[in-house]
Amino acid sequence: MLTKEFKPWHVPVFLAKYAYLTATRRPVLVHFEVTMRCNARCGFCDYWKTDPSAKATELTSFADAARFFNPMVITFTGGEPTLRKDLEDIVSAVNKAVRLKYMTLITHGGMLSPERGRSLWKSGINQFNISLDYLDERHDKARGIPGLSAKIMKAIPRMREIGISGIRFNTVIKRDNLDQLVPIVARARELGCGVNFSCYTDAKNGSTEGVIEREQTQQLEETIRELLALKKKTRGVITNSDYYLEQIPRYVRGEITEPCRSGMRTIHVDPMGRVKRCPDFPTDFHWTEFRKYEPINCNACYYACRGEAQAPLRFSRVRDVMATPRPLALLHG
Ligand code: SF4
Ligand code: SF4
């Protein structure tokens, strides 16, 4: 499934950039947290409690930082990035600053009208990652935004109609949505989107509401097997590596002991330009004083970005990239 902007010849070029960044131990993926503010009310995240006055300290441009890191994948995230009225300017400046890259936007989707989608797409966003953990009102309740799932389902076909081909659901696997995972993949397929799974953690604010219980391991394993089979049958819909999906039950059983390589393959830049190794760690320095990170002995989470950074470059991963010629597939599912 090719998107209009990316052709098969892009794949080896991106692979070359990936190899270069890996060999020089530079981050392949940079997340720009353009704001910490958010108008959702998720129980497992405290970003929405950010004081509105933080707006005054947010950088107006991330272009210099983007030029400095020159990564292969750039993600605009938050908080809720669409709260920023100047997001198009931010995206456009980064788009001009880095030549060979793939740019994504992570959003809860509550303010993503087709018109806003179009203007962000024109500014350079290649992929919209919309959070979706349930197909029904449970999603609205969990995010504290009435009517959210219905709004997302209405917006996506309209976004597709106006030519936005890069849309994915970001689905967090948690205690009470194991029954939703396969149906979410089916809905994504109907809508012509992808799904990227990540695993719930209480590392954000200590909320254990979504932590998968050990007693659920069997159900989890069966669901993962189903997802892997679905992935084979309909290449390009589920965008995680086989490796990442296979490791999730190990994480739940507490068996993951490999050091975390966040900070090496992926970094986060906060709204003021300060760098942290992952979303849930404190900042270490300003990007202008960047120093390379070493692996860390932390297993507090098994986010997709953490797990995918550990994934070996198996043949199945190359096949994933060919199915969806998006460089993000190499790293971030
Ligand atoms: S998880 Fe995302 S949508 Fe929910 S409060 Fe945090 S930043 Fe907002
Ligand atoms: S395991 Fe890695 S990504 Fe997760 S919280 Fe720890 S350092 Fe951050």
Image (tube, grey):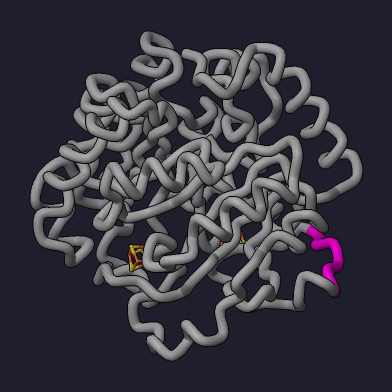
Query: Is residue 178 left or right of 322 when viewed as pictured?
Result: left
Q: Residue furthest right?
A: 24
Residue located at (48% from left, 71% from top): 35
Residue 317 part of the magenta-drawn span: no
Q: Is residue 16 above or below residue 12?
A: below
Q: Residue furthest top?
A: 233
Query: Is residue 235 left or right of 261 when viewed as pictured?
Result: left
Residue 239: x, y in percent?
A: 47, 28
User: Bounds of the magenta span?
Assistant: 289-294
Residue located at (39% from left, 60% from top): 82
Toward which corner of the image does residue 198 lie, by quadrant? top left
Query: How would you classify the magenta stretch by its main secondary structure?
Result: loop
Residue 243: x, y in percent?
A: 56, 30
Residue 291 part of the magenta-drawn span: yes
Residue located at (86% from left, 48% from top): 25
**In terms of depth relative to the viewer, which is nearer, 114 or 2?**
114
Residue located at (16% from left, 41% from top): 135
Toward which corner of the image does residue 293 lie, by quadrant? bottom right
Which quadrant does ligand 2 occupy? Answer: bottom right
Residue 294: x, y in percent?
A: 81, 60
Residue 177: x, y in percent?
A: 21, 45
Query: Is residue 194 left or right of 20 when viewed as pictured?
Result: left
Toward which corner of the image does residue 61 lie, by quadrant? bottom right
Viewer can see residue 253: no
Q: Is residue 187 above or below residue 104?
A: above
Viewer can see residue 16: yes
**In terms of depth relative to the viewer, which is nearer, 214 or 243?**
243
